[in-house]
Image (cartoon, rainbow, N blue to C red):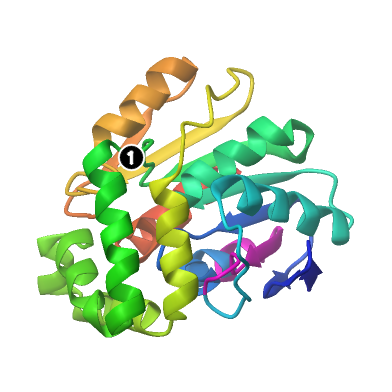
Amino acid sequence: MRINDTELAVEVDGEGPAVLLVHGLGGTSNFYQVQADALAETHQVIRVDSAGAGRSEAREDISIATHADDLAAVLDALGVASAAVVGHSMGTLVVRALAARHPAKVSALALLGAVAEPADAGRQAQRDRAAVLREKGTAAVAPGVVANALSETTRRDKPEVAAFVRELIMRQDSEGYARNCEALAAATDPGPIAAALPLLLVTGDEDKVGPPAVSEALAAAHGNTTVEILPGVGHWTALEAASDVTGLLRKFL
């Protein structure tokens, strides 16, 4: 689908109320395959590979804001007035920006492994990763993602999840991935989540990228939700705890 002068891979399955699934840094729409299959029984499920990720083209000016505007344009192109929106990792910043910039488009918000605006060290780490990607390619960063973002429990008991995460990273376009790392490095807080907007927060107790404290702070500021903390789960929430996340989303939606 041609969106804002960029070719984006968009998948639509099922019929019913719309739900938009937004992946994070290093991910693709396939991150949500288990949830998409389940939700398509009752919902119109929309998945987008963000600019520079997966099967979508990169553009020069990738940012949290441009990703949010792309999502709004996808909904417009599909004739969807509003959707429940699910975001993971960097995608939680994107969907929060979508709700802030296009509030009429978002009927409910679910955040998996929510991340905060990066601290200075985090910004530099993303810029460093971008440099490595450009010099050495995705093979140079994939082992670190698997080691640091998955829980020890997942790596030990679900090696197929670790293998899939490695494949997601390895299949990225190096330049597109680098530009998305730089987009995260430049990210700012999207602002408060409206108290009237239904909100679900899910994270893992071993998530070092989006630790429970981030979700708990968002919940406290929102004032009308709680945080679901999944034991033995790291940052790739929907893969590490696929059935739990599916059940929580079904109940929320």
- The residue type indicated by label 1 comes to Pro
The residue under the point 14% across, 68% down is 147
Q: Where is residue 158 in the image (x, y as percent from the top left)?
A: 20, 74
Q: Does the magenta stretch include residue 146?
A: no
Q: Where is residue 168 in the image (x, y as percent from the top left)?
A: 39, 78
Element class at badge 1: loop
Q: Residues within 10 Å of mark 1 (few under 14, many from 20)?
A: some
The quarter of the displayed image where residue 157 is located: bottom left
The residue under the point 40% across, 59% down is 181
Residue 198 seen anywhere in this rendered image of the structure: yes
Residue 180, relative to residue 133: is it above or below? Answer: above
Q: Which residue lies furthest to the right in this view?
A: 79
Q: Position of residue 113 (x, y in %)?
A: 35, 47
**Relative to 64, 81 lies left or right:** right
**Relative to 197, 143 lies left or right:** left
The residue under the point 65% across, 55% down is 20
Range of residues picked out in magenta: 37-53
Q: Does the magenta stretch include residue 40?
A: yes
Residue, disc 1: 118
**Relative to 166, 206 lies left or right:** left
The residue under the point 41% across, 68% down is 178
Who is closer to the viewer here, 152 or 15?
152
Who is closer to the viewer here, 65 or 164?
65
Residue 84, relative to residue 78: is it above or below? Answer: above
